[in-house]
Amino acid sequence: MPFKNKVVLITGGSSGLGFAIAQAFAGQGATLIITGRRKPELDDAVNRLGKNASSVRADISDPADLAGLFDHIRAAHGRIDVLIANAGIGVMEPLGAITESGFDRVFSTNVKGTTFTVQGALPLMGKRSSVVILGSTASINPGPGLGAYGATKAALRALVRSWILDIKGSGVRINLLSPGPVNTQSLRDVLGENAQQVIDDLSEKSTLGRIGEAHEIGQAALFLASDASSYINGTELFADGGASQV
């Protein structure tokens, strides 16, 4: 799955799954642009990714930031071959404690931000380009307190199924990659003080007996973005150790 001389944009690429995905593409020779909201973390990530990586500070929920991002890419590279729409946030608010601010924040980033990221990137994408959107198994099994977050990921599935019809014939593929629980700091932060117990419980649900590792999601993203999946379009690939299948 070579990506040498391919221009790859990864939103939310400075940490967690986004950074692991960026590492996977860097290892295949891609020209990387990563985004994030915090410049120090972006600078550190670029240093770790190597000479073919650069960054643009951008919050995908801010239309002005997105416009600036695509203007920069147009001027610097002229195109996007692969878009990994990874940027997103999670909130844990059970029914009865859902806040308007939390609800608005998760939908503004995960649904609105992703929508306008994809829409803004399309004019820079040509035939055989690929969009991979990061979903989640929370779309079908959100668990307690994750209703709003799960709803945003279910919305992405519906959007992808519509979008492939909207751009039929363009030669651009759009697929959804939906990880299960993955061993990242962000997961542990969301789970709080009971993180290890919850992770142990989630491992029991996996047919592989463990939760995922970030590099495994990076490999799945490589596959969906590459010509190895050239006849796969509009699908949702679950990378969750089989938990969603049983």
Image: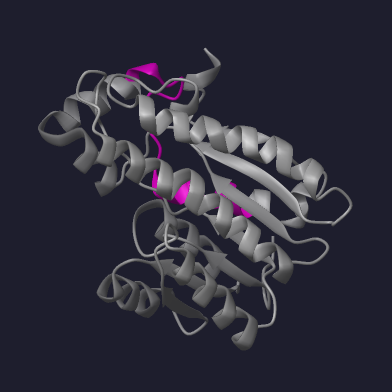
Instruction: Decide which of 78, 212 is in the foreground and name it.
Output: 78
Picture coordinates of residue 51 (x, y %)?
48, 85
Say if 112 sits above or below 31 in the image: above
In the displayed structure, would residue 178 be above or below residue 108? above
Residue at the spot x=20%, y=43% of the render?
189
Per the image, is 37 magenta?
no
Residue 127 seen in the current view: yes
Residue 147: where, in percent of width, then height?
A: 36, 24
Q: Residue furthest left?
A: 193
Q: Is residue 167 above or below residue 192?
A: below
Residue closest to the eye, 161 or 194: 161
Residue at 57% across / 47% down in the picture? 133
Magenta-span inclusion, residue 220: yes
Q: Residue 151 placed where, x, y %?
A: 45, 29
Specify whether 73 is left or right of 162: left
Q: Which residues are magenta?
A: 204-222
Residue found 70% across the figure and 57% down from its top: 130
Which x, y percent locates residue 40?
Answer: 25, 75
